[in-house]
Image (cartoon, grey):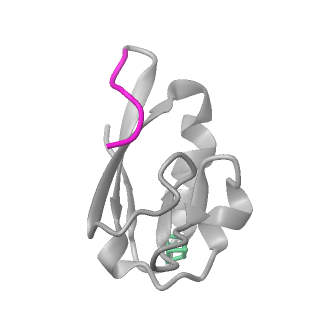
Amino acid sequence: MEGKYSPMSFQVVLYRRRCIACGYCVSLVPDIWMLSVHDGKVTHINHPDADDDIVNVFIEKGSRAIVKQSESICPVKAIKVLE
Ligand code: SF4
């Protein structure tokens, strides 16, 4: 899990097993998402060598709108923003 819960954060689940490594989310939010150096699938920039099927991250609420956009553009629904 990346980051820690705080009242100023929200949770995102990355279903990495679904990721097809298209890079759309990385192009949109390069300061948060990257492709893992381990397997080429989406991960958080603070966890560059992720290899888990599912990764939970906490992100500052100020980035919520752009992260929601990355959720929307993912063609395989690998990014899930929790309410
Ligand atoms: S947009 Fe979806 S499929 Fe493409 S790299 Fe991001 S998480 Fe993976």
The x and y percentages for residue 39 are 45, 79
Q: Is residue 73 left or right of residue 27?
A: left
Magenta span has 5?
yes
Magenta span has 66?
no
The x and y percentages for residue 3 are 41, 32
The answer to which quarter of the image holds residue 58 is top left
Q: Is residue 59 left or right of residue 1?
A: right
Question: Quarter holding the N terminus?
Answer: top left
Q: Nearer the viewer, residue 37 or 43?
A: 37
Compared to residue 69, the image places residue 15 above or below, namely below
Compared to residue 62, the image places residue 74 above or below, namely below
The residue drawn where x is 71% and y is 59% is: 28
Q: Residue furthest left?
A: 53
The x and y percentages for residue 26 are 65, 64
Compared to residue 63, the image places residue 71 above or below, namely below
Instruction: Give the magenta range.
Output: 1-6
The answer to which quarter of the image holds residue 51 is bottom left
The answer to which quarter of the image holds residue 7 is top left
The x and y percentages for residue 37 are 55, 71
Q: Residue furthest top?
A: 7
